[in-house]
Image (spheres, rainbow, N blue to C red):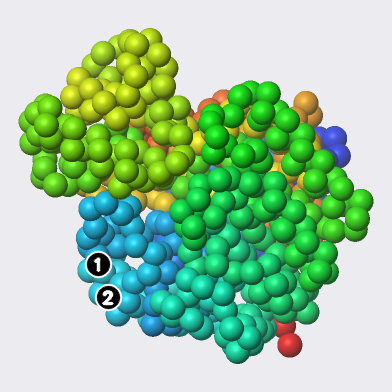
Amino acid sequence: MYDLLIKNGKIIDGTGVDAFVADVGIVGDTIAAVGDLDGEQAVRTIDAEGKVVTPGFIDPHSHNDLNMLIWPENEGNVMQGVTTAISGNCGFSPAPVEDVYVFSAWEYRLCYEAEPSVYTEVQFFFDLEKMKEQFKKVYDFDLDYKTLPEYFEKATRSGFSVNYYPFVGHNNIRTAVMGRDCLRNATAEELEKMKLIMHECMKAGARGLSTGLDYPPGCYATTEEIIELAKVAKEYGGSYITHFRSSKVFITGDPTSEPAEGIKEAIRIGRDAGIKVHLSHMIPTKNSSKGELTVEDKLLAATEAKDLIDEAVRDGVEITYDVIPNTVVGGHIVPTFAAVLKPWLLIAGSVEQAVKNLSIPEYADVVKKEMKAGKWPFTGFPGRPTPEASYCLIRHKDESMQGRTVKEIMAEKGWECFYQAVIDIFLADPYARMKYLAGFDEIWLKEILDHPLAMPSSDTFSYNSDSNIGLDPPLEKLPSVNNFCYAIRYLLNYGKERLEDSIYHMTGLPAKSFGIDDRGKIAAGCKADVVVLDYDRLATNEDYVEPRRFPDGVEYVIINGVITGDHKKHTGAKAGSVLAPRKA
Ligand SMILES: [Zn+2]
């Protein structure tokens, strides 16, 4: 007698072997049998004839951290078939947290409420007490833990849908020890304290160390500091996951970007600490500070990055990497073009008033000067080429601008000044919509994903279809489409020749590289994380104005034996587990 029986599906088991037709019998949270289970009884049976049955997808780069308890249904993950989120990435984890709370790039609404700012997107550090108040006020959430074990306990008690595989964030450890005085190298004594916390976290079941070396305070750490902490993670069998260093912009203001050096640093950490390395959300590893990269530059960058990785493997370093399978980043989108002018919109108080103000040439000149001086990062850091190629209009009253980047519009109209172009495009349609391009061209994506150690990732947070994270429109921020469809986007746009291979890169490969022995496979004895796809009907439904849409064709998503996604509806089940085995 099974609790759940999936009949006659085309099984793609996550190991890369050829698909086969079979039944899957589930008892409790475990796959009990795979084979011909004709005549067997079950509490519930799913007829999967003509459907593809795969292991649940493992997202190797997730930011399902504290937000997974605010939106515990984790709808964005579930509805695209993600059943395990590798979390605590880019140096940010929900804990430890001491007197200073470190912004981890989803708390826009909270942070703005706590410390409103005009010319800064956000501050990085907040008093914990102030943030606690905001968490309660904005999301009715009690931030009532400090350590990682306490967070695990809270998460387990309150429940959530998608399995949570926790890395401990270097930014958290650093801030817990150094407080706000963390924008410098650590002393020997501080490093010893950090190591103690690292020991505690690893004993509690953390899976390793994560760094975000482009953000404060992680960017202030020396390679040696990270090696020392990585050695502690290694003692407990953990691994090292990194948003590798690409520039020193936060430390010196110098935007010169040298991402290949960051990969080399990560490899050195892997070698010196004897630890497995995973590189997060790969970027084109070419210096882009002297101008926009050409397609040839990007292809060369993909080859160079893959060569660095192959060389590391030959040298005995265990290494893997993930790639966001889209031309936009994972975290968020800012759909309204007016947001490019955020400071001046805030000052004006309304779109209408901003239109009036910016129509006055003397005032427009003041704004242009401020933009040029780098007062607002959205219009470029000083010394860095202006980001005209990044803003792509997707809806504008002037149809000739639709589907064009600001750079293309400028070329077509013969405009020379980027800052004036921003103002003119805004004035012509204050409610125009845009897409922010990350510089990941299709051609680079195809090339960088074509590697035996590459896997697709979302760079996602845990959001539901009604999650609200930014200011009010037109300055809203919305979850990125990747939060809702990266997995399906990968399958449809970048998949391998054999579907079995694509599925392996989303299931078996991440399971193997993160040491999750009992997931990522459809096999007796494995945990019952299973997805049933109507493959011919798969569609991402991606929408860059309203990204909170679910893909088509994901029929069932089963997590730890419990049906959680059922034809684009969340069943309310919160069967996710903290995948954190305690270590002595
Ligand atoms: Zn990152």
- Residue 313 horizontal/vertical position (percent): 87, 52
Cβ of mark 1 under 8 Å from ligand 1: the answer is no
Q: Quadrant of residue 7?
A: top right
Q: Which residue is mark 2?
A: 130
Residue at 31% x, 54% y is 120
Q: Which residue is mark 1?
A: 114
Is 507 or 189 nearer to us in this picture?
A: 189
Amino acid marked by disc 1: Ala
Q: Quadrant of residue 395?
A: top left
From the viewer's perspective, tell me whether residue 293 is left or right of residue 401: right
Residue at 19% x, 42% y is 344
Is 135 or 42 nearer to us in this picture?
A: 135
Element class at badge 1: helix
Q: Is residue 339 visible?
A: no
- Asked if the residue at tag 1 contacts the one at tag 2, i.e. Cβ–Cβ closer than 8 Å, the answer is yes
- Residue 456 horizontal/vertical position (percent): 65, 42
Amino acid marked by disc 2: Lys
Structural distance between the alpha carbons of marks 2 and 1: 6 Å
- Residue 155 horizontal/vertical position (percent): 48, 72
From the viewer's perspective, tell me whether residue 49 is left or right of residue 291: right
**Mark 2 packing: few (<14 Cα in 10 Å), some, or many (20+)?**
some
**Mark 1 packing: few (<14 Cα in 10 Å), some, or many (20+)?**
some
Is 212 or 493 nearer to us in this picture?
A: 212
Q: Is residue 424 visible?
A: yes
Identify whether 552 is placed above or below 210. above
